[in-house]
Image (spheres, rainbow, N blue to C red):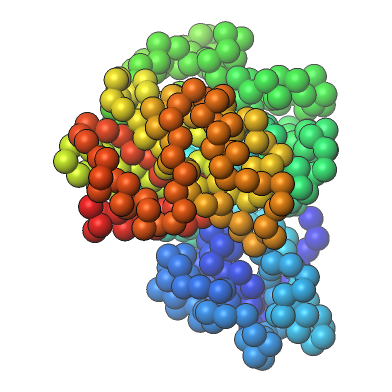
Amino acid sequence: MKKIRIGQKEIIHFIGIGGIGMSGLAQVMKTMGFNIQGSDQSKNKTVLNCMKVGIKVFTNHSKKNLKNSTIVVKSSAIKDNNIEIKQAKKNKIPIYSRAEILANVVSLKKNIIVTGSHGKTTTTSLIGKILSDQKLDPTIINGGVINSLNNNAKLGKGEWAILEADESDGSFLKLPINYSIVTNIDNEHLDYYKKFENLEKAFIEFINKTPPIGKSLICIDSKNIRRIKNKIKNKNILTYGFYKKANYRIANARYRSTYSLFDLNYKNLKNKRQTIKNINLKLIGEHNVLNASAAVAVCINLGVKIDIIKKSLKNFSGVQRRMTKIFTKNKNDFFDDYAHHPTEISSVLKGVKKSYNNRKIITVFEPHRYSRINSLKTAFSRSFREAHLVLICPIYAAGEKKSINFNLIKFANLISKNSRTQVVVLRNQEELSNYFKKNLIEDEIIIGMGAGSISQWMSQLKYKL
């Protein structure tokens, strides 16, 4: 880790401060007494949270924003042709990535680093809840807003920090580790890694960084984790999952409309088999039971009392945009979810089907990034099998140029064919609200999915129906 000297008199400018990871780091540093400011193109919820703690935020990108800055921190989403990056280089202001600054800020903490293709935000939140209830007052920097905090970050006075680590650009390899969790490895972020083998190598390197005095907990249910397991040199590995040979094995899982129940079997510190029975998790779906078992496993290794672990999971109030119920209309329940990858979509829909029995499931899907859709088109087309109806919105480009290889109608037809479900193509937000005005019956589950504008569209439906 490159040591960066940051004095209290520095003026640290965050470019892209509205990003979920950037805003969390900025708020923690502000609370620590650093002089923080930032810029972003719009005033979203995370920007408002930054402003609430006294951070000055410019809602544009301009040369003038760097007038007094002495250090620049840039989001991974910010390109080299950004006007503020160019100005920083011209003025010879040091530029650092978020991961580099984060690594230095938490270097004096004992760190639990959570990474993986899916589930890391929820897992981070669950660990944060348990350690907080144990009165350890941890620092938390997360990739989603934790409902109990109404924020995605908190500076704690305790010795532990729980950090969600971003694998999308390899920056998770820069963080100091005491304990680590890898939730799964999936076909994602190949725009950066180029080949899946490179992604696997990065995860192997990450796991091998966990020191002998710590533990690396890996989900053995992930076929890609099973495939790389023998390539890992580290001996301090613990596995978790439904897999019968897992060190922390999930059993007797049961699913209800607002919670899940499961048992967890493991060897205790005296090397004797022990079972925690009837863990009540206030989340639905097999994928969340996996996330919870990772959180339980790491907390057991930290010496947290089992009764506190069980109470924390039962009282967990969730993470925003993870099957968040936003309103009910005529006995129809509307939810908002961040799922924007085939595995995430499939996991959410399977969880809903198990928890809500035979209720009709309508998915409102906003495709995210041309590169992701084109590279995973077949997988996407097969991920809606549990949905009775799919409403497809226009693609959210996330800054990418329009792809001539993508056709929304053809994509919809492919989903209809491979998921064997009805698909309706929508052209805009107005058509979404009009569809539900005309076709909404009752006792239906409606889930908005995507990482772009869909959250806002779903929330506004409440006032249009």
Asked if residue 21 is positioned above or below residue 415 in the image, the reply reads below
Q: Looking at the image, can residue 12 be seen?
A: yes
- Left or right: residue 210 versus residue 114 is right
Q: Looking at the image, can residue 110 be seen?
A: no
- Report the residue at 57% width, 80% height from top: 60
Image coords of residue 183 (percent x, y): 60, 32
- Report the residue at 71% width, 52% height from top: 404
State the residue in front, 164 or 360: 360
Image coords of residue 268 (percent x, y): 52, 17
Q: Hey, which residue is sitting farthest left in the picture?
A: 330
Q: How many marks are shown on the rendered structure? A: 0
Image coords of residue 99 (percent x, y): 69, 58
State the residue in front, 453 or 2: 453
Asked if residue 9 is positioned above or below residue 408 in the image, the reply reads below
- Report the residue at 79% width, 55% height from top: 1
Asked if residue 421 is positioned above or below residue 86 in the image, the reply reads above
- Left or right: residue 51 versus residue 60 is left
State the residue in front, 365 or 293: 365
